[in-house]
Image (cartoon, helix red, strand yellow):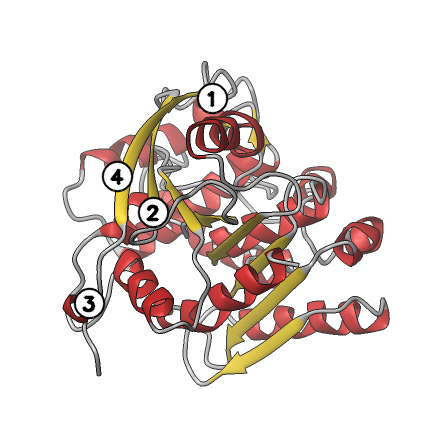
Amino acid sequence: MQFSGDFKSGEMIFISVHSDALAGNMLGDPAERKVGVYIPYDADPEGLPLLVSLAGYTGSGLSQLNWKNFGENVPERLDRLIATGEMAPAVIAFPDCYTRLGGNQYINSVAMGNWEDFLITDMLNAIENQFGCGGAGKRGLFGKSSGGYGALIHAMRHPDVWSAIACHSGDMGFEIAYQRDMPATLRALAKHDMSANNFVKSLWSNHSPSHTDIHALMILAMGASYDPDPSAFCGIRLPVDLHTCELDDTRWANWQAWDPLNIFDRHAKALKTLKGLWIDCGDQDQFDFVYVARRLKHKLDRAQITHHYEEFPDNHFGLDYRFDKCLPYLVRALQH
């Protein structure tokens, strides 16, 4: 195996993006956001394709730049892929999109902030104006889990902005992705008088929150993303009765309006315009996302939408090695 030291390092440049789209969010998160921008070694960024990395829940684009034991961080991976000719040069952006609820789904929300607008306006304008990369037909998105969801939902809603995307183990099929986690979320809230306020503040003060509590926080973050309550703490609202866990059809319909499988037919035409559409998932995914990925593939096949689909023998975590396949694919697509 060749290691990062065997290849010339690209340059990481950090910019700060002020976003009116994020100002005034209910979480009190900053509207000033740091974005790491990777420029390949000895390359002029002007005219190069632009890829944007969307981190999964609890992650940040900036965390993908950290030193990694027994392997490469993402910039080191890019150095190798470009140096060996497996991938053509491209600019890669790593925005910090972390929120106080542990992440986001990269959509507009009165609670979480207007992350959709941040990505397609504030961030893109800042990067493309400074580096001269990207532009119409030369922009792509990639991400895993929540990041994969973000890439797919942006492709559906903004095909005029993004021309190629990769969705790794992305959230979809919300009855599998979220609905079955409602009882466990209520059990977590029960320890705090069924109060999202008490639960979240307790978690914020806990230096070592449990996996169970982090997962419950994720469900609360989904509520603040898909169906926010402007009058509630951090906009958090669940689509179930807090006593019986019975589904509230009205509230759940608002969640379903953001499920890529549920809204596929309305956005199939947009997906057909993409230059590249990559979907993959591990066949041992702990959250059973492989089954909803298969549903998406069936919909794509029936709609005769060109795409690349793979299943691989792994689970939901530690999947950066999959970038070895999807990133060259995306750059090739954006070059045409």
Residue type (three-letter) at the residue carrying disc 1: Leu
Residue highlighted by disc 4: 203
Tell me which numbered mark, 2 or 4, is placed earlier along the sequence.
2
| Displayed quadrant of residue 292 | bottom right
Secondary element at tag 1: loop
Name the residue nearer the viewer: 61 or 160: 160
Q: Nearer the viewer, mark 4 or mark 1?
A: 1
Secondary element at tag 3: helix
Tell me which numbered mark, 2 or 3, is placed earlier along the sequence.
3
| Residue 82 in view of the camera | yes
Residue type (three-letter) at the residue carrying disc 3: Ser
Rendered residue at 45%/53% (across/down): 90
* Whole-number angstrom distance, CA of label 4 to CA of label 1: 24 Å
* Whole-number angstrom distance, CA of label 1 to CA of label 2: 24 Å
Residue highlighted by disc 3: 4
| Residue 186 in view of the camera | no
Secondary element at tag 4: helix
Q: Position of residue 143 (x, y in %)?
A: 47, 56
Q: Nearer the viewer, mark 3 or mark 4?
A: 3
Mark 4–mark 1 contact, CB under 8 Å? no
Tell me which numbered mark, 4 or 1, is placed earlier along the sequence.
1
Residue highlighted by disc 1: 22
